[in-house]
Amino acid sequence: MPLRLGILGGTFDPVHLGHLRAAEEAVEFLGLDALNFVPAALPPHKTDRNIVSFESRWRMLQLAIAGNPRFHLSDLELRIPGKSYTVHSLRSFRQEYPGAELFFLVGCDAFLEMNTWHDFREIFALAGIVVMCRADCSLEQILAFATGKVSGLYEADPSAGQIRHPELCSIYKLLNTRIDISSTRIRELVAKRRSIRYLVPDSVWSYIAENSLYTGAAGRPDFELARNGDA
Ligand code: ATP
Ligand code: MG
């Protein structure tokens, strides 16, 4: 049996229970051997605000996944110089694990914007795409996007919650418990000195408080980190 490897990219600024629960359900639903959280060093779509340092987002992820033997953390996007592009990360996973079956997890909000991502068509050839619901999203919507933006040859298999293609990898709709939590909401609450308890793991909550993250003080941009080795 080939290794079944899940990959969940994101800014994780900060990681929250919405990420963790959807990831746990994906591992179960797809029978994944491991799930890699891949924090973006320099997210291409998020240049409009200060993102907390890679080290802080990394530390919060470490705290959040502690004790789950299937959850792993990857510094891949930090090691690839320049902007963080999903396609580059997937190519690296493919090289590192040549026989593995890759599954890229993505929220439905981000999925419907994938046509704006760098070399996005290649992503659909490299990995199965697992669409996690955070708002309403139907298999028809996913199919319409796939046939409109990626390839006209996709066909839905509603009983399997899957969209198949003769050459590209399948697209799966994960029937995950919908948890309407976003990092944006958490940052807003912290900035207003409101509680974020039960939205993030307690260890992450403590880390945010101890390090005064998201209180409105200027965060350190990740530019220097991401440019390391970019000469
Ligand atoms: P922000 O509000 O800063 O955009 P976010 O909560 O969307 O943060 P990201 O780091 O942008 O978190 O998300 C990483 C991935 O996880 C994306 O594919 C996103 O769609 C997905 N995701 C985020 N929150 C949830 C959730 N509550 N349920 C399911 N998927 C989620
Ligand atoms: Mg987001």
Image: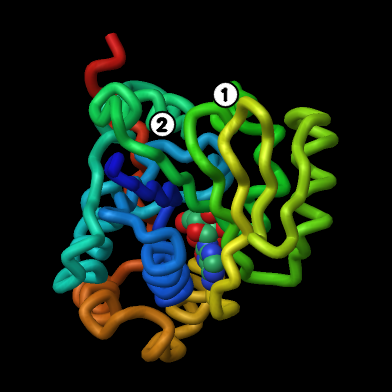
Q: Please report whichever mark, 2 or 1, sits nearer to the chain's N-terminal start.
A: 2
Q: Viewer-proximal residue, 134 or 204?
A: 134
Q: CA distance from mark 2 to mark 1?
A: 9 Å
Please provide percent x and percent y for residue 91: 39, 24
Residue 90 is tagged as: 2
Residue 20 lies in what quarter of the image? bottom left
Tell me which residue sits at (29%, 25%) in the image.
98
Q: Would residue 5 be visible to someone looking at this image? A: yes
The amino acid type of the residue labelled 1 equals Glu
Under circle 1, the secondary element is helix
Position of the C terminus, as image quadrant, is top left
Tell me which residue sits at (39%, 68%) in the image.
28
229, above or below 18, in the image: above
The amino acid type of the residue labelled 2 equals Leu
Residue 225 lies in what quarter of the image? top left
Q: Is residue 217 left or right of residue 153?
A: left
Please provide percent x and percent y for residue 14: 38, 64
Residue 77 lies in what quarter of the image? top left
- The residue pinned by badge 1 equals 122
